[in-house]
Image: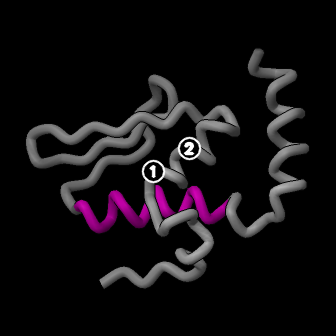
Amino acid sequence: MIDIKKIDRFPDNNLQEGIKILDDLYWFVRTEYKGNIWYIYFGDILMFRTDSEEAFDAFLYGLGITYIIYPSEIINVLHEELKKWAE
């Protein structure tokens, strides 16, 4: 069992919203499922792999929660600063 605190902060409790938040901050998250293995890439870098969908979800939710706990004003400033480097 995995119990994720603050999950209610995700819009619609949706994992895709967490990925969108990460991508808005230039994480370039990409996921794959093949051969009964879940993969998470940041850009072209394999960051995580597991045979457990529950662990896969928990990893992504955990990353998103890192940013969801901050007010949107802070995330907007962070996005603008990162944008200078990424574009």
Quarter location, residue 76: top right
Establish if 15 lies above or below 6.
Answer: above
Q: Which residue occupies 9% across, 40% down?
A: 35
- Where disc 1 sits, the SS reads helix
> What x and y, as percent, mark residue 63?
57, 57
Q: Which residue occupies 26% across, 54% down?
A: 50
Q: Nearer the viewer, residue 73 or 87?
A: 73
Q: Which residue occupies 31% across, 42% down?
A: 39
Q: Amino acid at mark 1?
A: Gln
Q: Are marks 1 and 2 in contact (CB under 8 Å)?
A: yes
Left or right, 20 with respect to 74, comes to left
Instruction: List the residue tagged with mark 2.
Output: 20
Q: Which residue occupies 33% across, 65% down?
A: 55
| Main secondary structure of the magenta stretch | helix
> What x and y, as percent, mark residue 45?
46, 29
Labelled disc at residue 16: 1
**Label 2, residues with CA under 10 Å away: few <14, some 14-19, many ≥20:** some
Q: CA distance from mark 1 to mark 2?
A: 6 Å
What residue range appears in magenta? 53-66
